[in-house]
Amino acid sequence: MQLTNRSKQVSNKQMTLAEKMYLPAVMQGLAITIKHFFGKKVTVAYPEVKRYLGPVFRGHHVLKRDEDGRERCTACGLCAVACPAEAISMVAAERKKGEENLYREEKYAAVYEINMLRCIFCGLCEEACPKQAVYLRHDRMVPVFTERDEVIYGKDKLVEKLDDRYVRTNPEVQATPTEPSLSRSVS
């Protein structure tokens, strides 16, 4: 009775002197090393040269502003509910008189925090937002943390600056020869 169909026949032939000294294996390994030494380099010198991340990359979170510079987030909490890692927390507040140029709606997020240690960059918060206030940037990675108190991102790190507006589809971006075309059709 045969228990598996993956059995192999083993031969007991005697090894030659060269095989006993592992010369063919050493030469084969040396040939592979020399081939890779003179071949095209696949590594990137990271701090100086940054790799193209692609238009579908999900990176640094950003809370968008509208055309007038007002925050779009209305603290509805749908992003926090949609987050499978429960990384988003917020506190809603009512807009006061005279703050019409700061917030779009009567309700806004007084506190909006994302725990970046818990975030899995799934993009569900971005999809759940009805006001299109939450985006995950495709051109910027989250920086490396060195202290535990740096992992909670508040509104100071999340709300986009007026001089550094994030645009998802930028028609002026041209693909360089090292990156794929940004204008190819998605199938």
Image (tube, helix red, strand yellow):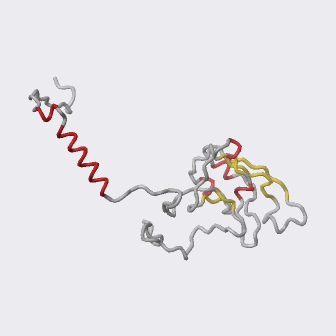
For the C terminus, the image quarter is bottom left
Q: Residue at x 42, y 71 (%)?
A: 177
Q: Residue at x 75, y 59 (%)?
A: 74
Relative vertical location of residue 110 with respect to residue 87 in this rendering, above or below: below
Seen as rendered, the residue at the extreme bottom is: 172
| Left or right of 31 in this view: 45 | right
Tell me the quarter of the picture where residue 18 sits: top left
Relative vertical location of residue 34 with respect to residue 1 in this rendering, above or below: below
Task: In this rendered view, identify the residue nearer to me: 116 or 126.
Answer: 116
Relative vertical location of residue 35 with respect to residue 171 in this rendering, above or below: above
| Left or right of 96 in this view: 130 | left
Tell me the quarter of the picture where residue 97 sits: bottom right
Task: In this rendered view, identify the residue nearer to me: 103 or 19.
Answer: 19
For the N terminus, the image quarter is top left
Task: In this rendered view, identify the residue nearer to me: 125 or 42.
Answer: 42
Q: Position of residue 160 (x, y in %)?
A: 70, 63
Residue 54 visible from this viewpoint: yes
